[in-house]
Image (cartoon, rainbow, N blue to C red):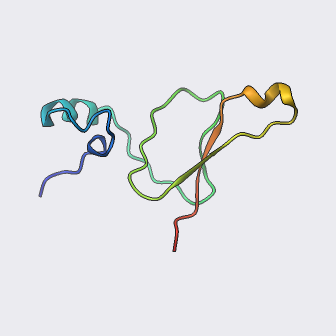
Amino acid sequence: MKEHHCTSIVPLFNHLSEEEQDKIESLVIHCHFNKGETVWQPGDEPLLIIVASGSMKVYMIAGNSSSASSPPAATKAPTPS
């Protein structure tokens, strides 16, 4: 059975050859998150996040107008029933 490449579902990578996708896939860290769990937040190291299944809600909480330009946080959203 052929191994699934998360890179194949990303338009930026899906046109690459299997060998090129293998190289990128070797850098991928597969993670599973529970509903409501924070995946990334401002101040964390920059990431490319690929959602292979389910959904993710990206939002920003601004205490005042000056913080509204902060990068958003990413949280795994509930999976539709």
Name the residue located 63 percent from the left edge and 57 percent from the top edge.
Answer: 36
Q: Give how far across and how far down residue 58 sits, in percent.
A: 61, 44
Q: Total number of numbered labels?
A: 0
Judged left or right of residue 21, residue 40 is: right
**Looking at the figure, which quarter contains the N terminus?**
bottom left
Judged left or right of residue 8, residue 33 is: right
Judged left or right of residue 42, residue 25 is: left
> Would you identify the image quadrant in which residue 53 lies?
bottom left
> Would you identify the image quadrant in which residue 24 lies?
top left
Judged left or right of residue 13, residue 46 is: right
Name the residue located 43 percent from the left edge and 48 percent from the top edge.
Answer: 51
Name the residue located 51 percent from the left edge and 74 percent from the top edge.
Answer: 81
Q: Give how far across and how far down residue 14 sits, in percent.
A: 25, 39
Q: Give how far across and how far down residue 34 sits, in percent.
A: 55, 59
Residue furthest out toward the bottom: 81
Q: Give how far across and how far down residue 20 sits, in percent.
A: 18, 29
Q: Is residue 80 above or below residue 56?
A: below
